[in-house]
Image (tube, rainbow, N blue to C red):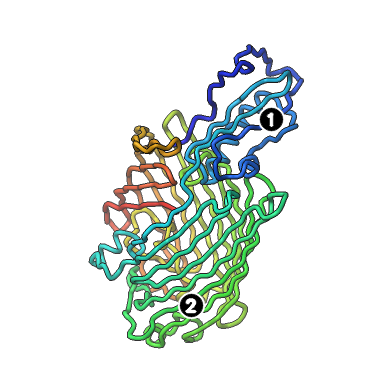
Amino acid sequence: MQAQPFAADTSEAASRPVVFNQYYSTPFVMGEIYVEGNKHTKAYIIQRELPFKTGDSIYLTDLVDGFEIARQQLFNTGLFNEVVVSLKSFRGYHVDVLISVKERWYIFPIPYIKPVDRNLAEWAKQGYGIDRLNYGFKFTHHNFSGRNDKLRMWLITGYTRQIQFQYEQPFADRSLKHGYRFGFMYSSNKEVNYKTVDNQQVFVDSLGFGLRQWTAHADWLYRPGLRTFNSVRFAVTNVRVDTAIINLNPHYLSGGKSSITYPEISYKVNYVKVDYVHFPLKGWMGEASFVKRGFNKDMNLWELSGSFTKAWELSKKNYLSFQAYGVLRLPFDQPFVNHRLFGYGTLYLRGLEKYVIDGTAAFMSRQTYRRELVRFSVPTFLKSTSHDKIPFRIYARTFADLGYAYNKSFNDNSLVNRPLCTAGFGVDIVTFYDLILRIDYSFNQLGQNGLFLHIKNDL
């Protein structure tokens, strides 16, 4: 899936013999940086991801490392199917560099259909009902003006009626360090998950309007260097729920209210130093966030959370990874809507996908060993230099997960306030456009086992 970091250069200058001693004290000077293959992406956006620039003094050994960093940074932007960083030529003590990219398709005006349930196992439990499908139209442009800016417009109906608009411009000033994001989302559900019983979501089909919610937000983005990303969000949310839901669970919202409006401010910082952010095999990355939601008794939440991922290449084709996640929500007495933890989205223990675990504090770790089995490409027969083949990488995997969730208010579920552990084995299939298919056969401490399928894709 990833191109090799170097490409052979057959130019006359590059074919001259170069004698270099790594202990030689005279550095080279970075000359011209050429970019090719970028039909839509601005060249300065590509050069923003490089650890070097024209005029830098650099030793050749450091340049080799810089080439690999540049390739990883460019590939992790999500803009390219293939990236090659190579030495173009020597001019005395000046070196010229060539950045060659193959751009992705950025525009996805596609029909949308997806089960509303947490995962495929939950949809199966609900009988694969077509009434539990969301469908509609999604328009996403991942590189709207060629500056890695993203435009999203969704019109969804079916189980959930949803309208969503968001625009993100990460490089809004000349320094390419400051950016912004703003958006709006409205959703409406007739069927509402109003409580959790025996570690299962309990739904009711409201005779009224069910649950309606809208959120508007504006974010400031700041990226001072290559690897650190900061964001500050200001948001306003309104939640309105049918009074029948409040009668079933008076703690669904604070104080038994059926409608609340609250502000939210949050800060998030990410650090990314991995070979491939969606499927890291080498390097580490981390995230920390702070959220303040509401300022009165209707909504009052302080949340601190963090995650950490470390991946090692043990030997050729053998990899080990460790992931950790933690969250603390204060005060511990929170309404039901602020209790979602394990089992929602990508936060789950492998082997407990059938269950949801609510709480206000939690910790989870994932330990995974992978062995690459095979990598190959399938031709597409398209007349396109960037989409002439589909690459695949397949890995065998074994894993073990640990977790714990604390719940003070709704502790009648057996998986809260106790250590959790799962284990299993599986297969990962990785292809382009960050599509990752995970097939697991897992075991949990309840003596249960089963086959689970997960599909990760951000389109």
State the image quarter where residue 86 is shown. Answer: top right
Q: How many marks?
A: 2
Frontmost residue, 131 versus 256: 131
Vertical comparison of 193 with 349: above or below: below
Determine which of the numbered discs, if any, sits on residue 32 in the image: 1
Separation (CA) of disc 1 from disc 2? 59 Å
Q: Nearer the viewer, mark 1 or mark 2?
A: 1
Vertical comparison of 443 with 46: above or below: below
Q: Which residue is mark 2?
A: 335
Q: Residue at x 41, y 76 (%)?
A: 188
Which amino acid, mark 1? Glu
Q: Residue at x 34, y 61 (%)?
A: 114
State the image quarter where residue 246 is shown. Answer: bottom left
Q: Quadrant of the C terminus?
A: bottom left
Frontmost residue, 284 versus 57: 57
Does label 1 or label 2 sit earlier along the sequence?
1
Q: Residue at x 34, y 71 (%)?
A: 159
Percent across and percent down for residue 285 are 56, 46
Vertical comparison of 407 with 77: above or below: below
Are discs 1 and 2 less than 8 Å apart at CB? Answer: no
Percent across and percent down for residue 445 are 33, 56
